[in-house]
Amino acid sequence: MEKDFAGRWEKNRTTNDGGWVMNNFERQIASINEDGLFSLDIDTLQVNMGLRCNQQCIHCHLEASPRRREMMEWPTMQMVLQAARSAGCQLVDLTGGAPELNLYFRLFVTALRQEGHPVQVRTNLSVLLEAGLEEMPEFFRDHQIQLVASLPCYLEENVCAQRGKGVYEKSITAIKRLNALGYGSKTNLPLNLVYNPGGPFLPPPQSALEEDYRRELSARFGIAFTRLLTITNMPLGRFRTGLGRQNQEGDYLQLLQKSFNPQTVAGLMCRHQISVGWDGTLYDCDFNLALGLPVNHGAPDHIQSFRPADLMKRRIVTGAHCFGCTAGSGSSCGGALV
Ligand code: SF4
Ligand code: SF4
């Protein structure tokens, strides 16, 4: 389904002869590339290990929370290991919820590293202070795990407004622990922080904001990090619910659409990665996962039938939310695109 700009949910439609009716995003893409949006390779295998999280952020596109029970099981992880082997991807990117809360997290990471895959974990930082996870920073270091950590502002007030009371303090404590192990200063232990806007507006320029973060976090806490990644809020999940409550959804969707930047299209993350849901379903990205829109157009849509040759050049499933990736400087799990 896609959301149109009058605020209704619409099903993608087919013509009487089985043809595809383009949505707004596809029409925009067709204006620069009439073949439409296709993947180019699978550099990254992103794995959503479950929707359980110790936090319940108001911007969460997956509506993760401590109450969610969806978790990836070990047999699915074994199929992911096989897929990573066959795809020869350059990175396995673990996300959630809080991936560290999955019971098989350490086993899975260890198996991936033993097979030589570079592994990145998207951590919310505060989870590293949870009971039973105190040794996780050392585990990360010992397995040379790359870290991406959400810290949507260097100011406490803004972080707590988005992510909950006490989260800022816990996040700073966790970063200090990671810094003490070499994260954020040693080249083999990257610690990238993630900013997302505190409302329905686009992120400021990434490099300028990175300078602000570096100056402020260093002055306040002596904290070091590798890079800052700016990510646009997607009109999905809890963020979309919040927009609806404030009657801002239509305006935000229009802002995203009118900010379309054709230079972002080459680097869209769905063109270079594939996302595995906690139950093994394949998605073009984590946002399509949030919407329940699996890989389509004839490509296999489950990890048990993962065949790189059939997935490498697949047609991407899109919707109005895709304008969140192409607005302004663009947005991806790796930050701005241009
Ligand atoms: S945004 Fe991240 S930390 Fe926050 S609830 Fe969602 S998964 Fe958890
Ligand atoms: S939302 Fe997903 S499918 Fe759409 S452009 Fe962004 S990465 Fe690609």
Image: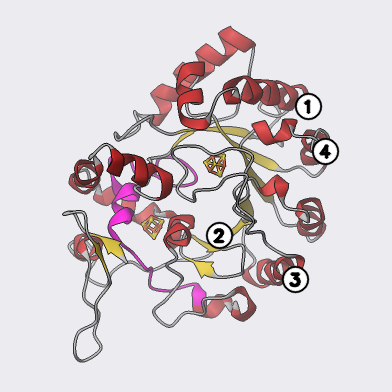
| Residue 338 in view, yes or no | no
Q: Are marks 3 and 1 in contact (CB under 8 Å)?
A: no
Which badge, 2 or 4, is on the more N-terminal residue?
Answer: 2
Q: Nearer the viewer, mark 3 or mark 1?
A: 3
Query: Mark 3 sits on what residue?
Result: 75
Q: Dot 4: what SS?
A: loop
Which badge, 3 or 1, is on the more N-terminal residue?
Answer: 3
Ligand 1 image position (quadrant): top right
Q: Position of residue 216 (x, y in %)?
A: 51, 12
Q: CA distance from mark 2 to mark 4?
A: 33 Å
The question of residue 327 being in magenta is answered with yes
Q: Position of residue 153 (x, y in %)?
A: 47, 23
Q: Position of residue 107 (x, y in %)?
A: 82, 56
Q: With 328 as the anchor, is 197 left or right in this view?
A: right
- Residue sitting at x 38%, y 29%: 198
Magenta stretch in the rendered image: 311-338
Q: Position of residue 225 (x, y in %)?
A: 61, 25
Query: Mark 2 sits on what residue?
Result: 43
Q: Amino acid at mark 2?
A: Asp
Q: Amino acid at mark 4?
A: Gly
Query: Mark 1 sits on what residue?
Result: 181
Quadrant of the rendering where the N terminus is positioned: bottom left
Which badge, 2 or 3, is on the more N-terminal residue?
Answer: 2
Mark 3 C-beta closer than 8 Å to ligand 1: no
